[in-house]
Image (cartoon, helix red, strand yellow):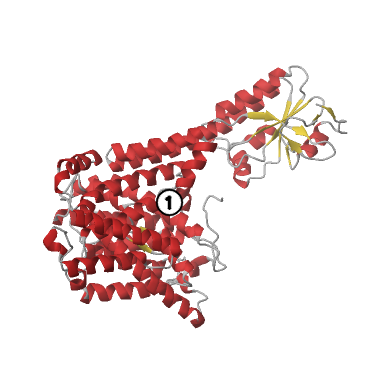
Amino acid sequence: MQADGDIRTGSGWKSWLPFRSMQGWSPKYLGGDVTAGLTLAAIAIPEQMATARLGDFSPEIGFFAFMAGSLAFALFGASRFLSSGSDSTITPIFAGGLALIATSGSPQYAVYAAMLALMVGAIVTAGGLLKMGWIADLLSVPVTAGFLAGIAIHIVISQLPALLGLPGGSGSVFDRVSAIAADWDSINAYSIALGIGVFLIVFFSERISARMPGALIALALATLAVTLFGLTGRGVHVLGALPEGLPKLSVPEVGLEDLRTLVPMALLIAMIVMVQTAATTRSFAGQDGSGPDVNRDFVGVGAGSLLAGLIGAFPVNASPPRTAIVSETGGRSQISGLLAVAIVLMLVLFGGGLLANVPDAALAGILLFVAQRILRWQTFAGTFRQAPIEFLLIAITAIAIVALPIEIGVAIGIGLSLLHGIWSTTQARAIEFENVPGTSIWWPPSSGSNGERVPGVLVAAFQAPLSFVNADQFGRGFRAMIDARAGSVKHVIFEASSVIDIDYTAAQALSGLIAYCRNRGITFCIARMESVRAQAALARFGIAGELGPNMIFHSVDNAIDALTRQGTAKTAG
């Protein structure tokens, strides 16, 4: 995948006009957008309530986050399908971090959450404007799977009190488990039945059809059961009537010291938002004939968090499941998201009383379903079978997120992903190439093949970008091959098709190798350096001048012909 991950439609200032997702829209698509919008609203209403409760916010704050994320993305995003709003992936992370500096559910907690949304929104928006879509590629698949596994465990543990009808706990995972064990005698069977019933309805509804609003159906049935059987009198906790009306625009007031405390958390959340947004954008690109524009979608999702912060909500994120719903139900533009916003708005303005008897256990059941859905079982099995070392990354990341403060665990996972990438680069080795008989192809030797070599010529490659992490390995590997054929090597051809870039440290190593060859009377040249960045690096670091004129060739055979003048007959290696 290319570094920026984008295939942009349009160019110049026109590509940044508002309502980019509406380009090419036709009235004939309205029916599909309406169907998708109605389905999206049915899915989003219970999900946004549940996610808000996951972060210790009132359910209507989840509605505000959804409206802010959807409105802003429709205005500034590019994807026709992407749905933005509150998200169960990032909510446990910032909720855990905020709980360290303010009491969960307190006014100060809400103020910090709103400021965090502004900070995350600013970072993600800046990432889009600065075309930093490449950041989304910094998390490997195993680390992402481990991260989601740890988040899933946090969701399950945090929702067990509501499912069991117990008081909500706080603190670490172990504190919450300890509190549940201490209150075990107070478990409410009705709450358990409601929560498990909701989970099963949502689970089997999705198995029947992803378009079926199982969560809304289950929530309605649970609420009806509470009302008909008077379960509030039997110890079942309910939401109570929600306040009606729109939030006011305001900038949260946070002291400078608290602002500094929020910076690491904002950077962490912003990176996760970028990764999930990029994955969502790329997964649903091309279905309408256009390519992904990750950077523009960063701007759309980032603007959603900015608006969410101004109305007193919390950071928002792209949602792969909701985006899939829009795509699968015939949505062709962000009109579907705007229609869902209109429905949620009606609920916010006039429907607070309708939600009074929604049981906490029902929202817990929905979140338990979300937790099992984000577990990547196929990735676990495939990695364990095919790459046991990378499976350790899954396990370590998940354990770190569960055992440590969640934001520290996530940071460890990101660090592991980066270290694994660096380690992989350091494992590159210099390797001698042989000619495939009867062709102009030079290839690494393989068992059973009879490659050919040219007497006096060493053709070697280094199959990785040249950088400070492998520069020493590069130089030592080439010198070892030259020394192994001491006295017989007259020409060294560096087959550089795999080298996409060269940094300063690697340039010094390459310059040292050229001098090493020259001191032994060996000619050194480069062939097949196809990367424009690598070519520019040769000129920038003066290596092209060190090589001398006409010592960079388009192919290995061109180099051999030039170096041996009339060419040399190839002999079996």
Q: Position of residue 375 (x, y in %)?
A: 41, 48
Mark yes or no: residue 64 visible. Answer: no
Give the camera-side residue of 122 and 357.
357
User: Which residue lies at the image location 46% right of the left edge and 36% below the top edge?
Assistant: 391
Neighbor class of circle 1 (other Cα within 10 Å; few <14, some 14-19, many 20+) is many
Q: Residue furthest left?
A: 233
Q: Position of residue 331 (x, y in %)?
A: 46, 72
Mark yes or no: residue 317 visible. Answer: yes
Q: Position of residue 483 (x, y in %)?
A: 69, 18
Residue 533, quarter of picture: top right
Left or right of residue 199, residue 548 in this image: right
Q: In the rendered view, tell whether residue 10 sits above or below residue 438.
A: below
Q: Position of residue 357 (x, y in %)?
A: 18, 67
Left or right of residue 411, residue 107 in this image: left
Residue 207, quarter of picture: bottom left
Q: In the rendered view, tell whether residue 532 sits above or below residue 344.
A: above
Give the camera-side residue of 349 and 272.
349
Q: Give the residue at mark 1.
A: 275
Amino acid type indicated by mark 1: Val
Left or right of residue 196, residue 447 in this image: right
Q: In the rendered view, tell whether residue 390 sits above or below residue 78.
A: above
Q: Secondary structure at mark 1?
A: helix
Q: Which image quarter is the C terminus in?
A: top right
Give the camera-side residue of 172 and 266.
172
Total numbered circles? 1
User: Which residue lies at the image location 21% right of the left edge and 51% below the top edge?
Assistant: 164
